[in-house]
Structures are given as structure tokens and as C-alpha cells.
Amino acid sequence: MKVNFIEYSDDFGIIFEAETVEDASKLVRYGINKTKEIKYSEVFADRDEKVSMQIVIRKKKQSRCIIR
């Protein structure tokens, strides 16, 4: 999966681009089962200069998605 991070004047954008069928199915499941509630968001900076970000978004309570 290819990820791009964009900074606008008032907000940020994260763009995920599927590179495989598995990536595409994950994005489709996300689109079907997501809510607008961010459960967790954090940026990590390690001593070895590695910087990463994690965002956890809640699923619908009864999320079900089958892709054939």
C-alpha cells in the first residue's frame, strides 16, 4: 500500500493507494465498515530517528463485509 501525507492550511490529509488486490479489499472494507470516530491517534519518534504515526478509527458495531 502506498501512503501519502498532505498538509493543507487548516488540516491534514492521508491518502492510501492500493497496490495489490489485498490492499484494495482492505480499503473497501474500511469504506464500508468505518465510523467517523477516531479512537486513537499518535505520532512516535524513536531514538534511532524513526518517526511513525498510528491512527485507529472505530468500526461500526456490527461490521460485516464479504468481498468475493
Image (spheres, grey):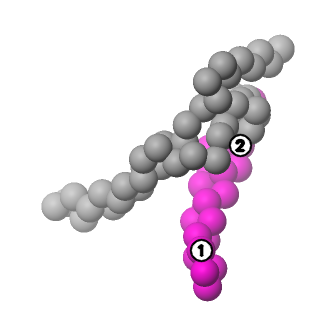
Q: Is residue 16 magenta?
A: yes
For mark 2, give the secondary structure: loop
Q: Give, as a single range, the part of the protein colored magenta.
A: 1-21
Tell me the kind of residue under disc 2. Answer: Ala
Q: Is residue 65 above or below residue 9?
A: above
Residue at 58% x, 70% y is: 12
- Which image quadrant for residue 58? top right
Residue at 61% x, 85% y is: 9
Which is in the foreground here, disc 2 or disc 1?
A: 1
Tell me the kind of residue under disc 1. Answer: Asp
Q: Is residue 51 magenta?
A: no
Alpha-carbon span between mark 2 and mark 1: 23 Å
- Which image quadrant for residue 43? bottom left
Q: Is residue 60 above or below residue 62?
A: below
Please give the residue where the numbered disc 2 appears in the rendered image: 18
Expressed as whole percent of the image width and height from the top left, the position of residue 63 reads: 67, 22
Does residue 22 appear anywhere in the picture? yes
Camera-nearest residue between 35 and 42: 35
Q: How crowded is mark 1: few (under 14 residues within 10 Å), some or many (20 or more)?
A: few
Q: Residues within 10 Å of mark 2 (few under 14, many from 20)?
A: some
Expressed as whole percent of the image width and height from the top left, the position of residue 6 reads: 61, 71
Give the label on residue 11, or none: 1
Residue at 61% x, 60% y is: 14
Q: Is residue 63 above or below residue 6?
A: above
